[in-house]
């Protein structure tokens, strides 16, 4: 039976990136029992992912995090770094992109033979309940999720409940992060080492940081309990992985937890964690 593959890539018109896309396409065209479709990230839709046996993302970490919102827990994802930093200081670090153009043919064969390493990664998700009772779930976040005032010049005001904490806060917003996301945006916001987080809890715990509280301090937590936020903002939003925005008004309730659908990310040289 043919393996049905979707290839998603970022269009940036850089020569090295275009060459990588062409090479991936060539390898797939020459592979046995493989059918595939190529889609630019800017043109892809949720329907493109339905019925796929494998999703291949060509680009960097940002390309993957913006695409994997569309991928369910059952469909494996393979990341191909189109411009590795090890070859060029201007390239992408590619933490989630364990394959490269040079190793792609071998890694694809490894995947088709069921020999790739499967990393089951937890994802954050926010559930927004409006004052009229409408419920909206955000896309799942692999790295981080922001809850804040849409006007960045205005403070974020809310009631925060998590575990034994129940208090009103005024800050520049709440930033949540998975264990693997701690090397991304949140690393520039807070010094997380004081929390003594244990990676053995990565499947159940997440980071929560109240940014720039009115007191001038920064409140942090490493928790496995849901965080409940009650908005005291005229207009706020939840933003998973810096991508789509989900808006809410004053009085809305936002629950953030590590209960989004997991992501099955394939690697070939190492287990993530």
Image (cartoon, rainbow, N blue to C red):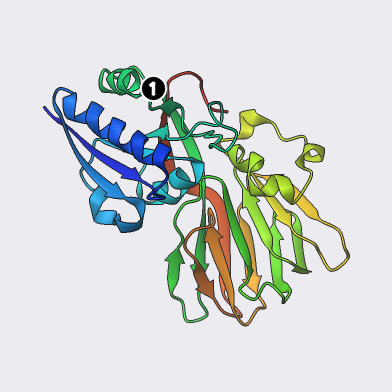
Figure check: 214 above or below 104: below
- Look at 46% across and 27% down and name the residue there: 98
* Residue ID at (65%, 76%): 151
x then y, percent, for residue 24: 30, 32
Q: Position of residue 198 (x, y in %)?
A: 69, 31
Residue 46 in the figure: left or right of residue 35 = right
Residue extending farthest to the right is 215
Quarter of the rendering containing residue 80: top left
Q: Confirm whether residue 74 shows in the render.
A: no
Which residue is drawn at the image coordinates 75% and 55% (left, top)? 164
Q: Which of the 4 quarters of the picture holds residue 162? A: bottom right
Instruction: Please indicate whether residue 153 sits to the left or right of residue 272 in the image.
Output: right
Q: Is residue 176 above or below residue 54?
A: below
Task: Tell me if I can see residue 150 in this picture.
Answer: yes
Within 10 Å of the Cα at label 1, are there few (<14), some (14-19), or many (20+) other Cα atoms? some
In this rendering, the answer to whether 218 lies above or below 104 is below
Query: Disc 1 designates what residue?
Result: 102
Position of 253 with respect to 14 (left or right) is: right
Using the image as rendered, state which of residue 93 and residue 237 is in the foreground: 93
Quadrant of the frame with the N terminus: top left
| Residue 82 placement (x, y as % from top left) | 42, 35
* Residue drawn where x is 18% and y is 24% of the image: 31
């Amino acid at each position: 039976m043919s393996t049905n593959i979707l290839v998603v890539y970022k269009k940036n018109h850089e020569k090295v990136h275009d060459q990588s896309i062409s090479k991936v396409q060539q390898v797939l065209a020459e592979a046995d029992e493989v059918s595939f479709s190529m889609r630019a990230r800017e043109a892809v839709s949720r329907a493109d992912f339905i019925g796929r046996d494998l999703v291949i993302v060509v680009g960097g970490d940002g390309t993957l995090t913006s695409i994997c919102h569309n991928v369910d827990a059952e469909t494996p994802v393979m990341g191909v770094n189109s411009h590795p930093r090890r070859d060029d200081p201007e390239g992408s670090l590619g933490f989630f992109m364990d394959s490269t153009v040079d190793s792609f043919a071998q890694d694809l064969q490894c995947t088709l033979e069921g020999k790739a390493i499967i990393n089951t990664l937890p994802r954050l998700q926010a559930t927004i309940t409006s004052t009229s009772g409408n419920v909206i779930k955000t896309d799942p976040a692999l790295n981080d999720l922001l809850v804040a005032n849409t006007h960045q010049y205005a403070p974020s005001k809310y009631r925060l409940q998590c575990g034994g904490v129940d208090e009103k806060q005024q800050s520049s917003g709440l930033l949540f992060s998975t264990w693997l996301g701690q090397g991304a945006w949140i690393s520039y916001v807070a010094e997380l080492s004081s929390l003594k987080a244990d990676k053995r809890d990565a499947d159940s715990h997440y980071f929560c940081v109240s940014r720039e509280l009115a007191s001038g301090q920064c409140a942090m937590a490493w928790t496995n309990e849901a965080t409940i936020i009650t908005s005291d903002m005229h207009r706020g939003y939840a933003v998973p992985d810096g991508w789509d925005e989900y808006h809410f008004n004053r009085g809305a309730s936002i629950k953030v937890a590590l209960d989004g659908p997991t992501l099955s990310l394939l690697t070939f040289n190492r287990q993530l964690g």
